Image: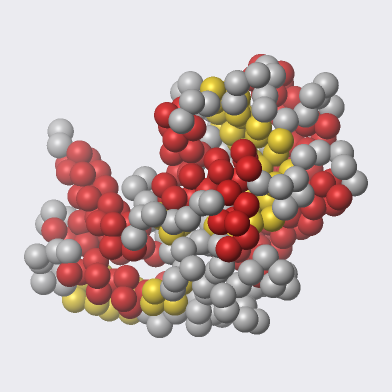
Amino acid sequence: MSKRAFITGAGGFVGRRLTRHLQTTGWEVVGGAYPEAPGMTTCDVTNPESIAEALHAAGPLTHVFHLGAIAFVPDAAQDPTRAMDVNLNGTIRLCDALRALEQPPRLLYIGSAESYGPPVHLPTTEEHPLNPNNVYSISKTAADHYCAHLSHIGVLDIVRMRPFNHSGPGQTDHYVLSSFARQIAAIEAGQADAVVRVGNLDAARDFLHVDDVLRAYEAAALLGAPGAVYNVCSGQSYTIQEALDRLLALSAVSIQVEQDPARLRPSDVPEVRGSHDALTAATHWKPEIDFDTLLQDLLHYWRDTLAQEKTP
């Protein structure tokens, strides 16, 4: 069988780009989304029948990429019950449906580096203790543990991924880099006052371009060891202040910066930085897109998006 993938959460930021990436590298791809999305199969991970019907409609598969989740930390905090139902129980339901297939495909479970919590050591490796400290990371960590259990008892072939912060064109401005880029683009377009509103600028994070993340997922799907878990990260950290300074330097407009208390998180970890040594050893994957290119891509995206919104 040729490489044939089903993607849950295919209508989301990463899901849309992963679909296009896999298609360009020779995969057949069936996208599952909820709510319904054009050209995609309806797949509601809170509904076992919806999952079974989506997999049946997809036909024989070699891989499933499980991206479907509530991925925004404040959304999970606001509705913990739904976050658990989608992120944890949705993963359990998907695994149940895969186990019922005559030939279960390999599952790539997309977890989160948030599972590590405040780092005990840097860089963070896959052996770092798991210490989730918010609703989102608790739900993702529980699902990660469940997938590890199924791998251990040999009922499914599962590779677990723990991506660190990643961004790129198409990401909602709920996330910090995209928020800065959108605010700057709006100021340039005369759609906002010349002020960028920020939260904590001292925190340092490991940022990766989404296109590098897509390559990592494909590489792990094809070459990762059964039952293994892999960090997806750049191995470098940048402060939010440095990211903002670099974005501002890309604009010719004079812009002020103001701290917005609403953007401050109560327990911001000073630095997050991961190690991708395990993934590199298994697949030869390495990040290829530098931080400045990520910032440029974000700013170009928001400039184009706002210009199109303004055009009648």
Name which residue lies at 87% across and 39% down: 155
In the rendered image, which quarter is residue 248 located in? Answer: bottom left
Residue 85 visible: no
Residue drawn where x is 20% and y is 39% of the image: 308
What is the quadrant of the N terminus in the image? top right
In the rendered image, residue 119, in percent from the top left (x then y), is placed at 62, 78
Q: Quadrant of the C terminus?
A: top left
Left/right of residue 34 with respect to residue 101 in the rendered view:
left
Position of residue 36 measured from the top left corner of the image (x, y, whole percent): 54, 27
Looking at the image, can residue 60 be seen?
Answer: yes
Pick the front one: 63 or 135: 63
Seen from the viewer's position, the closer of residues 41 and 4 is 4
Describe the colour scheme in one phrase: secondary structure
Left or right placement of residue 22 versus residue 54 in this view? left
Q: Position of residue 210 (x, y in %)?
A: 43, 50
Task: Count the marks.
Answer: 0
Q: Quadrant of residue 199?
A: bottom left
| 70 shown above or below 2 | below
